[in-house]
Amino acid sequence: MTETAGDRDTEAVSKFVESFAAQLVEAGMQRMPARVFAALLSSDEGVLTSAELGERLQISPAAVSGAVRYLTMTHMVAREREPGSRRERYRVHGDQWYEALTNREAVIKRWEAALREGVASLGPDTPAGRRMAETLAFFEFVDEEIVKMMERWRDRRDKQFGDVPR
Amino acid sequence: MTETAGDRDTEAVSKFVESFAAQLVEAGMQRMPARVFAALLSSDEGVLTSAELGERLQISPAAVSGAVRYLTMTHMVAREREPGSRRERYRVHGDQWYEALTNREAVIKRWEAALREGVASLGPDTPAGRRMAETLAFFEFVDEEIVKMMERWRDRRDKQFGDVPR
DNA sequence: CCTTAACTTCACAAATTTCTGAAAGAAGCG
DNA sequence: CGCTTCTTTCAGAAATTTGTGAAGTTAAGG
C-alpha cells in the first residue's frame, strides 16, 4: 500500500493547494499569491520554478510573475537563481514564512501611527481620545509580546523538530 | 485654547476616519466596514445610529446595513436597541473590539484544519508533510500564546487605565 | 389593527481588480 | 556579439466587487 514516490496522489495535493489557498484568500490575500504560496508549501523541496508553478496552477507566466512579486515583497517567499541558469526558483523557507506572517507588524505600526494621529485630533481628554489611546496601548503591548513570543517559538521548535541546517 | 465641546474640529475627525479606514482596508477589510468602524471609534460615546453613520460617511442606508452586518458578524461592533425605539444603535466596546481583532483565531483554526488535511494528503514523512507539520505546530503554539497574552493584557489594562465599569 | 419609521434585501450600474497574450527586456552560452 | 531562453511589463478583456435606489419586511405607537 505504499505509494510510488514520484507523483503521489497528485490530485489530493492539488486539492490541498486549492483549499489552503482559499483560506488565505479569505484572510485577505490575493488569489494568485495565495495559490502560488500553497503550491510551494506542498512541494517536496519547497522550491519550484516559474514554469513548474505555471503548469501546476494552470496560469500564465505573467500571473506567476505578479504573484511572486507580491510574495517576495512580503518576504513569504525567497527568490533564488541557480548560478548559470536563466531559471528563477522560488522557495518557502519553512520557517521564514511564518516569521513573515507575523510581520503584520508593519501593518500594526501603521495602525499605531493612525491612532496616534487620531488621539491628537480628538484630544486626549475626550472620551473618544481616551478610547483610542487605550487601543493604541493595546497595540504597543501586542508588538512587544509578539517579539517575545517568537523567541519562545524558536526555542520550542528547535527542541521539537531539531535545530536543522536550514 | 479649549475648544467648543460640541462639534470640535469636525474636519480633523473626518480626516482621521478616512485615514484609519484606509489602513484597515489595506489590511484586508472591506471599505465600508472599515469606514463605519473608524467612525464609531472616533465618536465620543462610541455609539452611533444608522442615520448618523449614513450622514457622516455620506453613504446610503443600504451601505450602512451591509457594513454593520459584517462588523457584527466579526464581533467588532455590537448592535443595540434602545427599548422603545425603532432606531438601531451600533457600539464599539473599547475593549471588545480588539478582542475581536485577536479573534482571527477563527481564521487560524481554519488554516490549521487545512494544514492538517495537507499533512494527511502528502504523508507525514515526506519533506512537504514535515514542513507543513511544523507550520501547523507553529499555529497551535500561537493559539495558546494568544490566550495567555490576552490575559496579561487585561491585567495591564486594568492597572493602567483602571478597571472601569464598561 | 393600521400607520409609519426604520432597517434589510435585491437587482443592477459603475468601478475596480484580475488575468491574459503580446511585446520588450535581461542574461547565459555558443 | 548575437541567439536563445526565461522573465517582466503593459494594455485590454473578462470577471468580480461595490454601492445605490427601490421595493419589501418588521415592529412601535396611535
Image (tube, coloured by chain):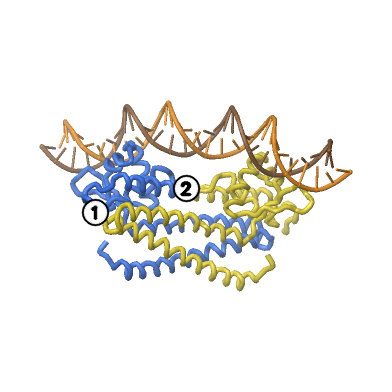
Chain colours: A yellow, B blue, C orange, D brown
Where is residue A165? Give x, y as percent: 69, 67
Secondary structure under badge 2?
helix
Q: Is residue B160 above or below residue A94?
A: below
Tell me the distance, in whole angstroms, between the alpha carbons under discs 1 and 2. 36 Å
- Looking at the image, tell me whether mark 1 or mark 2 is earlier in sequence order: 1
What chain does badge 2 belong to? B
Q: Which residue is mark 1?
A: B1
Q: Is residue B37 visible?
A: no
x 44%, y 46%: residue = B25
Co-location on one chain, circles 1 and 2: yes
x 58%, y 61%: residue = B135
Secondary structure under badge 1?
loop
Give whichever of B4, D7 is nearer the camera.
Answer: B4
Marks 1, 2: nearer the viewer: 1
Q: Is residue A127 visible?
A: yes
Q: Which residue is mark 2?
A: B26
x 61%, y 51%: residue = A72
10 Å neighbourhood of mark 2: few (<14), some, or many (≥20)? some
Which amino acid type is shown beneath numbered disc 1? Met
Specify the quadrant of the image occupied by residue C14.
top left
Where is residue B115? Give x, y as percent: 58, 57
C9 relative to A98 in the view: left or right: left
Residue B42's mark? none
x 30%, y 56%: residue = A129
Q: Point out the image quarter for the C terminus of chain A.
A: bottom right
